[in-house]
Amino acid sequence: FWYIFLTCFPVALSVVFNTFKKSIKSNDKAKRIYLCICGFAMFLLIALRHNSVGSDDSFNYYNNWSYLQSLSFDSMKNYVPGHEMEAGYLYTVWALSKVFVNPQFVFVFSGLFFSIAVCRYIYINSKEPTISLVMFFCLGLYTFMVQGLRQSIAMSICLFAIEYCKEKKPIKFFV
């Protein structure tokens, strides 16, 4: 149900915007508000999901947050080299887990990051944000983002990096 709702939501919201004479194609402010509302809906569905939703990876990420929370920095130095997950991801989760106790925050932070990256990219590069969002949902990219957490973080980082490449800012691109 929620996936169908999220797929139809951008179209329904676009109709509402156009009904009130705020075309999201020609009005930059309306486009920004439209993408913020759609991004917030996307964020909520990712952030508030249960750890059993999606593949087994979701459960593992949830438990990994709890485990990393119990480690000291010195223990992390021993844990990271022997682990199959990326060191940057593990240290980021470890640091966040020290500040935010509830493991649900792994979904909150990833959902926020994904939503901002996707909506920002669409805002900058799309003349038809409704079509871009519908394609994003219908082509399975949203579903992939819900299930492939680390890969989706990498894809989101690339969405930010593409803009620096277009602006010919190689240092920011590589960072």
Image (cartoon, helix red, strand yellow):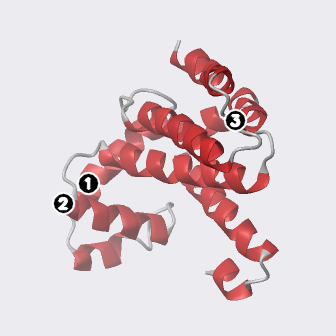
How dense is the environment of label 2, judged by Cα within 10 Å: few (below 14), some, or many (20 and up)?
A: few
Secondary element under disc 3, as helix, strand or loop, is helix
The disc, 1 or 3, on the residue closer to the chain's N-terminal end is 1
Q: Position of residue 135 (x, y in %)?
A: 76, 32
Q: Position of residue 144 (x, y in %)?
A: 63, 38
Per the image, the residue denoted by label 1 is 67
Residue 147 in view of the camera: no
Secondary element under disc 1, as helix, strand or loop, is helix
Q: Furthest-bottom residue in view?
A: 171
Q: As rendered, which of 76 and 21 lies closer to the eye? A: 21
Residue 15 in which image quadrant: top right
Instruction: Tell me the CA gap for discs 1 and 3.
Output: 36 Å
Q: Amino acid at mark 1?
A: Tyr
Residue under the point 56% across and 56% down:
153
Comparing labels 1 and 3, the label whose residue is closer to the camera:
3
Instruction: Tell me the CA gap for discs 1 and 2.
Output: 5 Å
Per the image, the residue denoted by label 3 is 133
Residue 159 in view of the camera: yes
Residue under the point 27% across and 46% down:
103
Secondary element under disc 2, as helix, strand or loop, is loop
**Callout 2–callout 3 Cβ contact below 8 Å:** no
Per the image, the residue denoted by label 2 is 70
Residue 136 in which image quadrant: top right
**Callout 1–callout 2 Cβ contact below 8 Å:** yes
Q: Amino acid at mark 2?
A: Ser
Q: Which mark is residue 50?
A: none
Q: As rendered, which of 133 and 55 lies closer to the eye? A: 133
The disc, 2 or 3, on the residue closer to the chain's N-terminal end is 2
Residue under the point 48% across and 32% down:
41
Instruction: Tell me the CA gap for discs 2 and 3.
Output: 39 Å
